[in-house]
Image: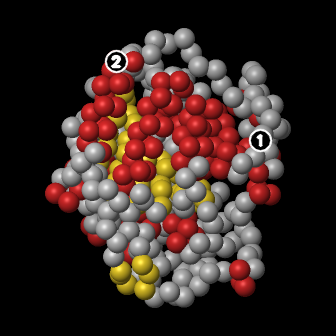
Amino acid sequence: SGDIGNYYYGQGHPMKPHRIRMTHNLLLNYGLYRKMEIYRPHKATAEEMTKYHSDDYIKFLRSIRPDNMSEFSKQMQRCESKHTTPHTLLSYSHTAGAVKLNRQQTDIAVNWAGGLHHAKKSEASGFCYVNDIVLAILELLKYHQRVLYIDIDIHHGDGVEEAFYTTDRVMTVSFHKYGEYFPGTGDLRDIGAGKGKYYAVNFPLRDGIDDESYEQIFKPVMAKVMEMYQPSAVVLQCGADSLSGDRLGCFNLTIRGHAKCVEYMKSFNLPLLMLGGGGYTIRNVARCWTYETAVALDTDIPDELPYNDYFEYFGPDFKLHISPSNMTNQNTQEYMDKIKQRLFENLRMLPHAPGVQMQVIPEDSIPDDTVDEDTEDPDKRMSSKKHKYSSF
């Protein structure tokens, strides 16, 4: 939606929703829209958002404005975290992509405006108000017995981990900077609790990780996760603040290195939901998510940027790809091997290929009217009511 790019978090604030508009425009000018269907989801209802969030919190978000903040001082203390800036929030349906995957209308769904992984049940955090990821996963769980969530944002995916910390139906895997860094969670020893024990996986990283080191940990860890957990749907949060030169980040990944994660998870040929997240050097965010869309589409795009509405942002080189900096990679081989070893030990505790069960599938959260940009052939639609009972 064009409205997303209009949001303004205030002077000097690093979160710039304008980056979504830049990404969309770059995608269009590369001609990638010809290879996919573009949908404009409807605005989210309170009912949709309270599938996870508390009623009071959503009511608070809908009511608060800069001019009435004093009336909400009690709730402000309770609901709002010091890491966010309150403002009236226009929220779009967070489940449209999940519904498309559930109806088998697409293999990959992408929402670069999503991925707001810090929002809690009754609290905003880290520039995130509504946890679209949790809402989308809840939708996927109607059709999928096991959903895998992977987070490659530089920050720990704490809101998603917390939501599913005690269940074995969602495994959360987060690769993040750890140690005196927001949000301060995501220790190697945080592994889940109760039925969810061993279903939370955290890879704490140090400053300066580069493409080679990242690939060296991401692929083996995810290969083991896929083997042991055997999910039937994957959600990948592609936060671009793990790129070299990010305004808030301290990693040293190139866009190609970041996109290797997309490429690898795509190779498993499971329903895949790709989401945005952090990213504060906005010219690189647009570059990254455009390239990752091309990767999802198995399409090569030139390094020379096409002319677009924000062309001047990409100077002085006007190229798609970025070079890493000469910062030191503090993740030594010894350190990475040790963490990897510990995680493998935890993953070995999982029951191999969890059990199968029959269950009634609840109705989809959203009506089948999300099409706006394209009109699909109605004959090609899969009826979501075709199989009332499904075996997993």
Q: Which badge, 2 or 1, comes first in the chain's sequence?
A: 1
Residue lying farthest to the front in this orientation: 352
- Name the quadrant of the C terminus: bottom left
The residue shown at (45%, 44%) is: 223
Residue 253, placed above or below residue 18:
above
| Residue 294, percent from left and from top | 70, 46
Q: Amino acid at mark 2?
A: Glu
Say left or right for 112 vs 58: right
Residue 13 appears in view:
no
Say left or right for 25 vs 189: right
Callout 2 crowding tier (Cα within 10 Å): few <14, some 14–19, many ≥20: few
Q: How many marks?
A: 2
Residue at the spot of label 2? 334
The residue shown at (80%, 35%) is: 302
> Mark 2 against mark 1, which lies toward the viewer?
2
Residue 300: which numbered mark, if any?
1
